Amino acid sequence: MFDVGGGELMLIILAVLILFGPKKLPEFAKMIKRGVNEMKNAQRQFSEQVTEITREVQKPVNNIKNTIENEVKDQPKQVIKEDFVNKN
């Protein structure tokens, strides 16, 4: 997601230590962890909702598809039958 190298990571950690001090660092880490976990949960819920909507939309599409396929399968039989009846 982020392209952070080793040197950049060390610079970020140093900046956090200077800004918040060593005593606040565990609290800051917990806060970051909670934020990341909340983002993961939100992403998971979003994916589940998109999947559910896709399933709901797919049902009528499949019904229409099956109806068309059945009509196409039956059509040649009717044409052959009508042609046979018309010739005799």
Image (cartoon, rainbow, N blue to C red):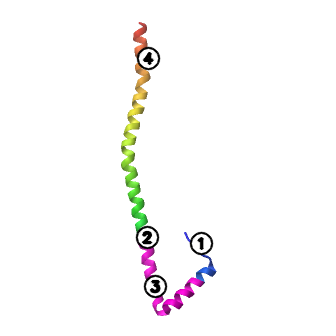
Disc 1, disc 3: CB below 8 Å?
no
Occupied quadrant, residue 66: top left
Cα distance between the residues tagged 2 and 1: 19 Å
Disc 2, disc 1: CB below 8 Å?
no
Pointer 4 local density, CA inside 10 Å: few below 14, some 14–19, many at least 20: few
Q: Position of residue 85 (x, y in %)?
A: 39, 11
| Nearer to us: label 1 or label 4 | 1
Furthest-top residue in this view: 88
The boundaries of the magenta stretch are 11-38
Helix, strand or loop status at disc 1: loop
Give the amino acid at mark 4: Ile
Give the amino acid at mark 2: Met
Pointer 1 local density, CA inside 10 Å: few below 14, some 14–19, many at least 20: few
Disc 4, disc 2: CB below 8 Å?
no
Query: Mark 1 vs mark 3: which is more N-terminal?
Result: 1
In this rendered view, identify the residue nearer to me: 42 or 76. 42
Helix, strand or loop status at disc 3: helix
Give the amino acid at mark 3: Phe
Where is mark 2, residue-wise? 39
Where is mark 1, residue-wise? 3
Where is mark 3, residue-wise? 28
Where is mark 4, residue-wise? 80
Give the amino acid at mark 1: Asp
Query: Mark 4 vs mark 3: which is more N-terminal?
Result: 3
Query: Mark 1 vs mark 4: which is more N-terminal?
Result: 1
